[in-house]
Amino acid sequence: MSGSDAAPPRRSHGRLKPVVSVTPRDLMDGRKQLAGAWCAKVVTLMPEVFPGVLGASLTGRALDQGLWALDAIDLRTFGEGKHRNVDDTPAGGGAGMVLRADVIARALAVAQAAAPGPDRWPLVYLSPRGRPFDQAMARRFAACEGITLVCGRFEGLDERAIEHFAMEEVSIGDFVMTGGEIAAQAVIDACVRLIPGVLGNAQSTEEESFSAGLLEHPQYTRPATWQGRAIPEVLLSGNHGAIARWRREQAEALTKARRPDLWAALAREGDDG
Ligand code: SAH
């Protein structure tokens, strides 16, 4: 690091669809989301970190092509008073600050103004207390018309806002981050790559980890031998049946060893079916 005090360079999104940091007035004026495109609305105190990593590579190209759309909605805009306060001290005492229910409500009134019901447009609060995010959830979200993601900061949201809006609480893992923005980007990435046309090869989402309840088999590419290690012979045999069998065995062995929970779920499914 240079250690300089200068503000970090701001990445220009010139080529990309710009992050739309909407104000209430913009939305009242009737801004419309792209017709037909899956849309992620993110309520955040840090709209400048979007699209972030989503603006690069496959998700970035898809954003550019209008295969999906992003609205980063600045929660600060909906704050109280001259200083646009969004938080206050926790009732009952304790460390940190809590995001105010009335401020969240004003942001959601705008974000959800034209949104259909939760079965077609889920309203998600990223939270370590939430249901663990998984591939099935990504498929469900990606099949909707869009999603609204609320990013917490500090100690999180006033519980009444979560209840009032019947937010679906979703966690990206059993650890605590300082805010929901990275979690929101993780969720959006997993959804966007499922949108038809985003990945080059449609098969790649059918055969990858979790799609059949298994972890993926190991992958290899050239050179054929590296550091004295050869690519497993069967993969070079051209025998597609044998290759499929080998991959299945490998996927099962990996899943058994690393994810006994997934393996047990698969066994139960087998019993039920
Ligand atoms: N006091 C809260 C944690 C707040 S962390 C608690 O103990 O449950 C601040 C914000 O970061 C949260 O509101 C949430 O939006 C986000 N966050 C932190 N860890 C997360 C995780 N594992 N998954 C999803 N969001 C998370």
Image (cartoon, rainbow, N blue to C red):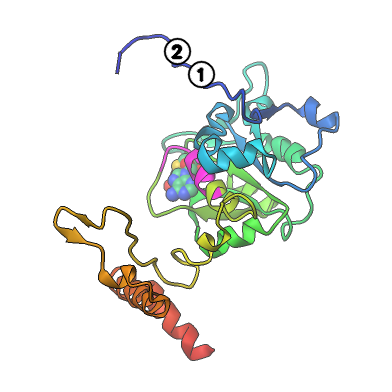
Left or right, 52 with reference to 254: right
Residue 266 versus residue 69 in the image, above or below: below
Residue contact at pointers 2 and 1, CB within 8 angstroms: yes
Determine which of the numbered discs, if any, sits on residue 78 in the image: none
Secondary structure that dominates the magenta span: helix
Q: Residues within 10 Å of mark 1 (few under 14, many from 20)?
A: few
Between the C-alphas of marks 2 and 1, the distance is 8 Å
Q: Which residues are magenta?
A: 177-187
For the point 60% across and 29% down, the residue is: 86
**Residue behind label 2 places its C-beta within 8 angstroms of ligand 1:** no
The disc labelled 1 sits on which kind of residue? Arg
Is residue 111 visible from the viewing direction of this image?
Answer: yes
Q: Which residue is mark 2?
A: 7
Q: Nearer the viewer, mark 2 or mark 1?
A: 1
Q: Residue furthest front?
A: 238
Magenta stretch: residue 184 in it?
Answer: yes
Instruction: Using the rendered view, name the quadrant where residue 178 is placed.
Output: top left
Left or right, 259 with reference to 180: left
Residue 97, how many percent across, how many down? 49, 34
Helix, strand or loop at mark 1: loop
Magenta stretch: residue 158 in it?
Answer: no
Q: Which residue is mark 1?
A: 10
Residue 227, how many percent across, how many down? 15, 53
Is residue 70 visible from the viewing direction of this image?
Answer: no
The disc labelled 2 sits on which kind of residue? Ala
